[in-house]
Amino acid sequence: MEYTLINENGTCGGNVGTEPTHNNWTLTPYLGGLIKEFWNGSDWVESATNEEISETKTPIYRETIYDLVDKLSDSAKERALGKVGDNLTKEQLEKLEKRYLVKRQVAYDIVNNTPHQNKIMADLIDFEQENDFAGEKLLQTIEFLNSTYNTSIPTDTSRLIMYCNLILAKYELGRVADNLFTDLIEYFRSKMITWLDNGQFDKIDNGKAIVLSITSNNTIDDIMALKTQFDAL
């Protein structure tokens, strides 16, 4: 059994394993989480003023909000690039995004029969359509995107042109998703900063919990539903 000591000013004096010889103790443990704890005779309560609470919590919560924004930004980039679960660093994601832009341009040139100077990327695109999307996988992927996202990728052409159109469609879907997630992240950040300025720490806690509930399996519709919950706080 542990005994929680009570200081003369009502604050917690720590724990001991044997019953004290004085009466300034309780079997109710102090679990932390208070700015200025105080034993009121039956429970540990907050005795700090609103100003003291705000002064202590504000810098901690501000750092928490911006840490959350950074995590959301990295997650959004993973989604946009189709690399969720690959555990790539921020630098690796940024480099990959640049290469995707180059691949997108070469694919665009091939579809439009426009001369290009990047034979290496053109060879890579041809390799991918033959190996990564071999057999029925190419058509199955196109049919999925066409039916799910209305991408209108043509299938009455060569495999190379179909794959180049697939690249263009996936790039555009990633760009749209990236813009949406970026807007949502700013939306979450701005509202939580407003709550911080108003000392509404409970709202920040609840908002953070909603945002952290987003997983890689959530669709855009799922995330918009979570935004509705966020707005209701």
Image (tube, rainbow, N blue to C red):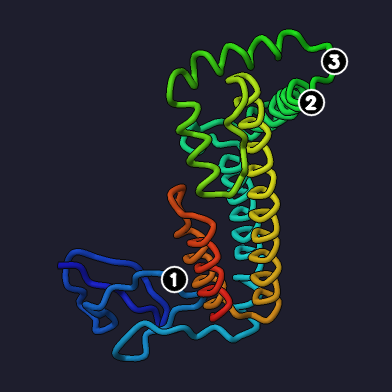
Query: Mark 1 and mark 2: span between their CA atoms?
Result: 63 Å
Closer to the camera: disc 1 or disc 2? Answer: 2
Instruction: Give the image location of residue 11, x and y in percent.
Output: 42, 78
Dot 3 falls on a residue whose secondary structure is: loop
Residue under the image location 25 percent in, 78 percent down:
28
Going from N to C along the chain, the mark reached first, 1 or 2, is 1
- Residue 67: give its label: none
Residue under the image location 58 percent in, 11 percent down:
127
Dot 1 falls on a residue whose secondary structure is: loop
Instruction: Identify the residue at the far front of this view.
Output: 156
Dot 2 falls on a residue whose secondary structure is: loop
Instruction: Give the image location of residue 119, x and y in percent.
Output: 75, 8
| Residues packed near mark 2 inside 10 Å, few (<14), some (14 to 19) or many (20 plus) | few
Is 42 rendered above or below residue 78?
below
171 sits to left or right of 7: right
Going from N to C along the chain, the mark reached first, 3 or 1, is 1
Q: Name the amino acid type tagged 3.
A: Pro
Instruction: Give the image location of residue 83, x and y in percent.
Output: 53, 34
Mark 2 and mark 1 in contact (Cβ < 8 Å)? no
Residue under the image location 37 percent in, 71 percent down:
13
Instruction: Identify the residue at the far left of this view.
Output: 1
137 sits to left or right of 63: left
Q: Nearer the viewer, residue 186 or 173?
A: 173
Is 155 rendered above or below residue 144?
above
Q: Which residue is mark 2?
A: 112
Q: Which residue is mark 1?
A: 33
Instruction: Identify the residue at the far bottom of this view.
Output: 41
Mark 1 and mark 3 in contact (Cβ < 8 Å)? no
Q: Name the amino acid type tagged 1.
A: Gly
Q: Which residue is mark 3?
A: 115
The C terminus, quarter of image = bottom right
